[in-house]
Amino acid sequence: MSVPFSTIWTQWFPPHGPLNENNLPSQKEKVFIVTGGSSGLGYVVSRILYGSGGKVYILTRSKERADQAIAKIKSFYEGNDGGTQVGSLEFISMDLMDFESVKAAALEFLEREGPDGRLDVLFNNAGTGGRKNAPKGAQGHEYHMTTNTLGSYILTKHLLPILSRTASRSLAGTVRVVWAASLLVETGAPPSGIKKEWMQDQTVVRDYVELYSQSKAGVWFLASEFARRHSQSGVLFIAGNPGTYNTNMWQYTPTLLYWLFRVFMRDESQHGADTYLWMGFSYSITVDDAVAGRYAMCDGRWHPGQRSDLLVALRSEAEGGSGRAGEFFEWCDNVTKAFLP
């Protein structure tokens, strides 16, 4: 059921990816959403997209932090003499812990873009690291699943029509939804990725590492199910591990554990966006890859083979699988239905 240690090791110390800020093609006239774009990997992605000419919406909780990030990004390109045609940056308030806030953010984006607007790539980047004794979300759901998975599900559901419209007038496979998973999908998620009994009773799992890990397995399951269920939309859905970086994702990690893993962490300013850029823009990725549930890993390549129980979970019972990914998708739809379009 486990993956080879070499596969885990290469995600701690990955080779540099094929796409980076130096060779990313111009994104002029394209529109992007980066959730959590004011810090960490989201900030780096936002900066690169802006520098390549894209219109970037940063969806995050704090206006103050978003304003600081926007000013910092603009300052980064001031005086650039290399012919860079920068894009634009906009802030929309969104708190993933509150489904009402997520719905409001999606509707505000749609209003700003208008009936002729577009959305080329949605980067579902925002999330939380493992947090012991974490509070519940505003609607009473478990913290990690609320922040890492359910909020992004609601956002994606609301934005699927504009993504589909954009896909209808774009090159095949270039309109995408990118989901941030984690190395802990393969090292910490319970058998089948998400416990069925947990979906019936969210108190049956107490360990915060397991709760975090299964929320990230859920991210992959959602990307796969969206790809299967909306294959005719023209939108490509992909999930993957963006890498291990020293960001505020670790803010709730016990000090001893943080310093234990610190040796494996990289500076996000160095290649921190490479996996996202590959998932978001590589022409080598196809809709067929997405429908097959392929999983990306740092710094821009396919995982050589995930855990066997997780691969079984991606397939329906009719296909010889357990159907757990499909069950989870339906569960997400049920618990968030009051906030869906």
Image (spheres, helix red, strand yellow):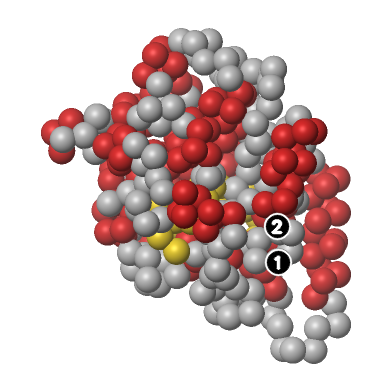
In the image, is 78 to the left or to the right of 112?
right
Within 10 Å of the Cα at label 2, are there few (<14), some (14-19), or many (20+) other Cα atoms?
some
Q: What's the amino acid at mark 2?
A: Arg
Q: Give the x, y percent position of residue 289.
A: 31, 58
Decide which of 191, 271 is in the foreground and name it. 191
Label 1 sits on a secondary structure element that is loop
- Spatial CA distance of label 1 from label 2 is 8 Å
Residue drawn at x 44%, y 16% as measured from the top left: 198
**Front disc: 1 or 2:** 2
Q: Could you say which disc has been placed on residue 270 in the image? A: 1
Residue drawn at x 35%, y 51% as measured from the top left: 305
Q: Give the x, y percent position of residue 45.
A: 65, 61
51 in relation to 307, above or below: below
Can residue 95 be spotted in the picture?
yes
7 in relation to 315, above or below: below
Tag 2 residue: 266
The answer to which image quadrant residue 277 occupies is bottom right
Residue drawn at x 31%, y 40% as measured from the top left: 308
